[in-house]
Image (cartoon, helix red, strand yellow):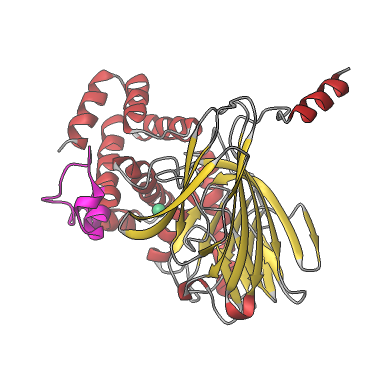
Amino acid sequence: MKYLFILLLAALGVAAPARAMPFVEVNLQVAPATHSFTCRYRFTLPASDTTSVVRLNLNSHFKLQPVQATQNAQSRITSVQYAGYPHQQIQVRFGPNPRRSRSIELVYTGSISENNYTDQAALFSAHSEWLPFRPYQEYEVLPYQLTVQVPPAYQVRSTPQPDKQKAGRWTFSGTTSAIEFTALVAQQFYQAVSVAGPPITLVKAGVPLTQTDSVTLRQAEVITAFYNRTIGRQDPITRFTILMPGNNSGAYGLLDNATVITYSDFDVARTNELLILAHEISHKWWGYGSFHDETDWLNEAFATYSSLLYLQASGDEAGYQKELDRLAQTTPGTPPLWGFDRYKYEYPMHRRVMYNKGTGILHALRTRIGTEQFLTLLAQSAAKKTSTTVEFLQLVEQIAGPETRGWLLAELKR
Ligand SMILES: [Zn+2]
């Protein structure tokens, strides 16, 4: 009977069962020799979502084929300035029929920028700007399926293990931020897995692992164990991937239990690089604020202070104090964190306020309420995936009382 009902729903074109979130299917065809690609991106709204207009922003360098959308939809494309960069914005207006799932399909071709490839590898990830996203929702969390097609001599790695793989075709699936679906393409990968605790896989593209990489993996193991006892104890890491493409273009955390570290000479024997590793791993929990407004402190100050908690716990009290002092020296005269508008300032001010000032405020909060209560607060905030400062203040009130909430609000407005 149930089967018949589902058949009937299918015949009527009604999604069954309805998905709560939009779903994304991506088919990425990569030509590694030229760093170029073709991407087929299908964005499906569930039947329960009655949104009538969907906008998707796409890198203006890509060549977009005519937009396909569910029948009765009208689409148009405009050029927009977005966060200071030109984008093409695809706007699709659906006809009224709210009980059906509706899809938009974009097919586009292009090349990834120079800082996302090396002679050995091509990186499609959060900083490669290869995916469309809804404006101001780069970090909306979406279930996805990613299929990557490469020439037969190439392999693909991502943040999860592949669901399926055969020569030239790799399929991954999961749930992560809209711009964080990841494909690292190379002819040869070298990788190692941690021996204790949750499996941590270090994946290096094109170049054999060194003793320094073994130390990185060992440190990642120790950092993860520390976080799983402290900030992550209500939502621990159960697997983690460190992708090392070697393109020397920064480091960043990915929500799906992974980090991309692009430095080819990365060495955690240097305190600064140890802090980078600890910062990026902690983004597993600190990734729900917005990149565009004051709530970025929930990402960046929390990740920075988490890395300092680790440094201190590892026994380097002097390093902890030195780093706190260094950050504090950059904050006098900065505008308040509360309501900070990054687009009114050059980027360095964003760092001074969101990262450095925010870190100082977290340190002051810990000093005020004590380490034990502070870690309870962070662990609960991480488990709740706090995404606004107001939510965090409410949690502070629950755990540390209204006076501390008032004190923190005053600090944020200072
Ligand atoms: Zn960060």
Q: Residue at x 45, y 67 (%)?
A: 61
Q: Is residue 389 above or below residue 43?
A: above
Question: What percent of the width, then of the height, locates residue 305?
Answer: 36, 47
Q: Quadrant of the N terminus?
A: top right
Q: Is residue 220 above or below residue 289?
A: below
Question: What percent of the width, then of the height, locates residue 194?
Answer: 66, 58
Queried whether the magenta region covers residue 203, the answer comes back as no
Q: In the image shown, does 385 or 200 lie closer to the viewer?
A: 385
**Which residues lie in the magenta part?**
325-353
Q: Is residue 318 above or below residue 55?
A: below
Q: In the image shown, does 251 or 362 lie closer to the viewer?
A: 251
Task: Using residue 388 as the reference point, say whether residue 259 is left or right of it.
Answer: right
Q: Is residue 239 visible?
A: yes
Q: Is residue 207 visible?
A: no
Q: Residue at x 49, y 63 (%)?
A: 128
Task: Using residue 78 as the reference point, say whether residue 11 is left or right of it.
Answer: right
Residue 204 lies in what quarter of the image? bottom right
Task: Using residue 286 as the reference point, say whether residue 111 is left or right of it.
Answer: right
Q: Residue at x 56, y 70 (%)?
A: 245
Residue 316 lies in what quarter of the image? bottom left
Q: Quadrant of the C terminus?
A: top left
Task: Using residue 189 as the reference point, say whether residue 234 is left or right of it.
Answer: left
Q: Is residue 191 above or below residue 147?
A: below
Question: What percent of the width, then of the height, locates residue 297?
Answer: 32, 44
Queried whether the magenta region covers residue 326, the answer comes back as yes
Q: Residue furthest left?
A: 333
Count of numbered circles in the view = 0
Question: What percent of the width, then of the height, locates residue 168?
Answer: 77, 68
